[in-house]
Amino acid sequence: MTKQSSYHTKLGLLKEIKQLTLNRILNWTCTGIDTRYDTEIAQGRIEVEFIRLLRTDQVGSDNIIASIHIFNMTYDYAVGTEGFDLIIEIIALSQPNWQPSWQMGLKRSEANLLKLQNLHPRS
């Protein structure tokens, strides 16, 4: 086994879960509300919970933290991190109702990137 940083090992867990979900080995179930999902395998249960923080100066709230419990460990990722994005992708792969929102967010981010790239002077 090669020595990796903790960061890369944790992201490796999420990438493996994403691949298993993509290959339909892991099947995620919404556990009653749209912020909790789980999947069962022989080795145990994997659970995802999205945490929303309520701001009093805004209407509604978005997912701010993605928490994933893998066997006996819990990992928390804040919005804007690679881990958070991977967890969103994992759930979007298995939950058709997540697809439109996920795709819209991706398109908006790509459009924003293009706007910023267009600020560079042209030669």
Image (tube, rainbow, N blue to C red):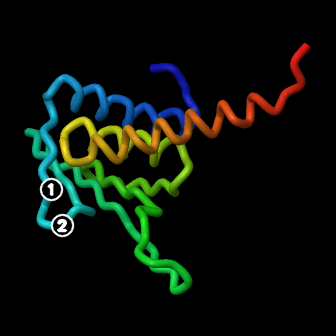
Q: Quadrant of the C terminus?
A: top right
Identity of the residue drawn at 45% across and 44% down: 105
Identity of the residue drawn at 45% across and 61% down: 65
Three-letter amino acid code of the residue under disc 1? Cys
**Compared to 71, does 90 lie above or below?**
above
Q: Quadrant of the N terminus?
A: top left
Q: Secondary structure at mark 2?
A: loop
Identity of the residue drawn at 51% across and 80% down: 55
Residue bearing mark 1: 30
Q: Is residue 93 left or right of residue 14?
A: left
Return the residue found at the far bottom.
Answer: 56
Q: Could you tell me residue 5's position as x and y percent?
A: 58, 34
Q: Could you tell me residue 45's position as x and y percent?
A: 16, 50
**Compared to 1, does 45 lie above or below?**
below
* Label 1: few (<14), some (14–19) or many (≥20) C-alpha neighbours in 10 Å: some
Q: Quadrant of residue 94?
A: top left
**Compared to 7, does 66 lie above or below?**
below
Residues at discs 1 and 2 in contact (Cβ within 8 Å):
yes
Q: Could you tell me residue 72's position as x and y percent?
A: 28, 54
Using the image as rendered, state which of residue 93 and residue 82 is in the foreground. 93
* Label 2: few (<14), some (14–19) or many (≥20) C-alpha neighbours in 10 Å: few
Q: Is residue 115 left or right of residue 102?
A: right
Q: Could you tell me residue 31's position as x and y percent?
A: 13, 61
Please tell me the numbered disc located at residue 33. 2
Q: Secondary structure at mark 1?
A: strand
Return the residue found at the far top.
Answer: 123
